[in-house]
Image (cartoon, grey):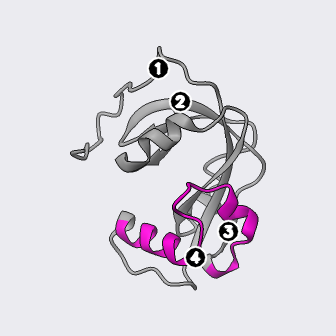
């Protein structure tokens, strides 16, 4: 199984609609991905929604670790459409990780570009450990 960036089910259509080649970003709680350099520049990864592959992507550049209140306008601009300000990001991360999140919370930022959609891989469910959400 390839490394992946996984999004909750409600982002499925947005992930499908994103243009190939456009720079995007994902925020992950904490610094474990950053400390371990989990994703590396040029690496191909799966973009998943609810643990099902939707498309491939290529990691762009270095990971960034910062507090939420240190995110810049570009980071928000590259994010999912409803995660475009600090309060929305705090709410999303708190709900996703089921723990308290504040403006001082450290996150890892990963930059990537989507590859074109490939119907051959779309909705592949190859994660034996996934707990799939009801839609």
Q: Position of residue 84 (x, y in %)?
A: 59, 66
Q: Nearer the viewer, residue 114 or 16?
A: 16
Q: What is the quadrant of residue 98 in the picture?
A: bottom left
Does 25 sit left or right of 49 as displayed?
right
Q: Which residues are magenta?
A: 69-95
Q: What is the quadrant of residue 63 in the picture?
A: bottom right
Q: Position of residue 125 (x, y in %)?
A: 34, 28
Cα distance in 3D space between marks 2 and 3 = 25 Å
- Foreground tag (3 vs 4): 4
Label 2–label 1 contact, CB within 8 A: yes
Disc 3 secondary structure class:
strand
**For the C terminus, which image quadrant?**
top left
Residue position for label 3: 65
User: Total of numbered circles in the picture?
Assistant: 4
Inspect this view and state whether residue 4 appears.
Answer: no
Does the magenta segment cover residue 94? yes
Disc 1 secondary structure class:
loop
Above or below: residue 49 compared with residue 67:
above
Above or below: residue 134 compared with residue 93:
above
Cα distance in 3D space between marks 1 and 3 = 31 Å
Q: Position of residue 87 (x, y in %)?
A: 51, 78
**For the N terminus, which image quadrant?**
top left
- Badge 2 or badge 1: first in the primary sequence: 2
Residue farthest along the right direction in this orientation: 61
Residue position for label 2: 55
Residue position for label 1: 121
Mark drawn on residue 59: none
Q: Position of residue 11 (x, y in %)?
A: 44, 47
Label 3–label 4 contact, CB within 8 A: no
Cα distance in 3D space between marks 4 and 1 = 34 Å
Residue position for label 4: 86
Cα distance in 3D space between marks 2 and 1 = 7 Å
């Amino acid at each position: 199984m390839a490394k992946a960036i996984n999004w909750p089910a409600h982002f499925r259509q947005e992930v499908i609609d994103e243009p190939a080649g456009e720079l995007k970003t994902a925020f992950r709680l904490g610094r474990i991905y950053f400390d371990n350099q989990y994703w590396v520049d040029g690496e191909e990864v799966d973009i998943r929604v609810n643990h099902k592959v939707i498309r491939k992507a290529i990691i762009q550049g270095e990971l960034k670790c910062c507090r939420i209140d240190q995110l810049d306008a570009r980071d928000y601009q590259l994010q999912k459409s409803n995660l475009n300000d600090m309060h929305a990001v705090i709410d999303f991360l708190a709900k996703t990780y089921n723990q308290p999140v504040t403006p001082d919370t450290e996150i890892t930022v990963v930059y990537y570009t989507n590859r074109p959609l490939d119907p051959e891989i779309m909705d592949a469910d190859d994660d034996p450990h996934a707990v799939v959400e009801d839609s």
